Amino acid sequence: MSVHELLGSIDDVYAWAYERGWTDGLPIIPPTADRVEKMMASVPRAPQEVVAELPPRRAAATIEALAVNAVMAGCLPQYFPVVVTAIEALTDPKYALLMMNTSTNPSAPMLIINGPIRANLDINCSWSVLGPGNRANATIGRAVSLAMINLAGRVPGTVSKSTHSQPGRYSFCLGEYEEKSPWEPLHVERGFKAEDSTVTVAAPTGTINVHDKDSKRAEHMLMTLAHSMEVIGSNNVFIRYGYGEIVIILCPDHAALIAQDFSKQQAKERLLELTSKMPASWFPPPRLESMRAGVPDQIQGDYVRLAARPDQFLIVVAGGHGGYHSVACHTLGMAFAVTRRIPS
């Protein structure tokens, strides 16, 4: 039976797809022919056009195959151009998708959406921006995750050796709150026009809550942020020094405080300075020996550096107003963020 010919109740379809390993464990929308056709109609591309070959399976991610996954995820047709563009971005060699889908690391694709499309699709950029409650964020991220399972072959245990994985592998999609950012938005910083709509894919291993309600000066806020990121067990610190970025999602209040004294570039440079003196005494001797042998520049006297360059701090403004919380995300290490323009 073809996925386009599914009949029966929602329960039957869900059970049928689950038995075949086509789901993330959650219920799906049946990918009937009419739903898939409507999804594909939102992009001016042929159904059998290959968007990418997703590692490790290298299955052809055709427009039709991606539409099937988008339908199952619950996407509306107008979301589909974002899904297609995100898949294209994920297969850029800079992103290291093969490593993500096969390694013991828990990293997951994070989608950061910028530009006018945020309003057009009602992308959440504010309260609970990384949580439930918004159809666009939830289903766009889930469509990409389902494509990782069904096309890339990211099957837990047999292909994906992720020791614990993480909730971001269900869905990990947010919009930047450009209207509340004191700086240029992410896509403009990365060379696109403000009127462009883009998706940036990053590779976070999880989230770190950064709580600060006491700082009244930008320098103090950056101190809290910097020392919250000094996690010696992250891939960014060990093995992959100088690779990848740490994604920093500042709430509007924290961003406004930092912007009183720092441009975005200056904030990155200050974070690099503040995170360059992790005491070597924090590290077990065997790890220090490995670091001295493999990345000697990371150790300077009695201190260890978190990052090699300021551009390894990727700053985004998102989240609710009046809060005292921001988020830092260490990444896979080998993966660098990739940004693509979403065709209008």
Image: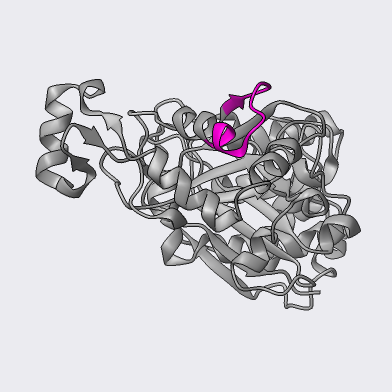
Residue located at (39% from left, 36% from top): 105
Q: Residue 143, image x and y in percent?
A: 69, 49
Please indicate, yes or no, whether residue 339 appears anywhere in the rendered image: yes
> What colour scheme does the image use?
one colour
Horizontal side of 63 relative to 202 (left or right) equals right
Horizontal side of 212 relative to 267 (left or right) equals right
Vertical relation: 228 (above or below) 99: above
Q: Say whether residue 263 is magenta.
A: no
Vertical relation: 272 (above or below) 157: below
Horizontal side of 104 relative to 67 (left or right) equals left
Please indicate, yes or no, whether residue 57 appears anywhere in the rendered image: no
Give the image quarter of residue 277. top left
Q: Residue 335, image x and y in percent?
A: 42, 53
Magenta part of the protein: which range?
A: 209-222
Q: Say whether residue 213 is magenta.
A: yes
Q: Nearer the viewer, residue 125 or 38?
A: 125
Residue located at (18% from left, 21% from top): 284
Q: Nearer the viewer, residue 263 or 139?
A: 263
Give the image quarter of residue 214. top right
Q: Residue 100, image x and y in percent?
A: 43, 46
Q: Nearer the viewer, residue 180 or 318?
A: 180
User: Which of the image's four quarters has the C terminus?
Assistant: bottom right
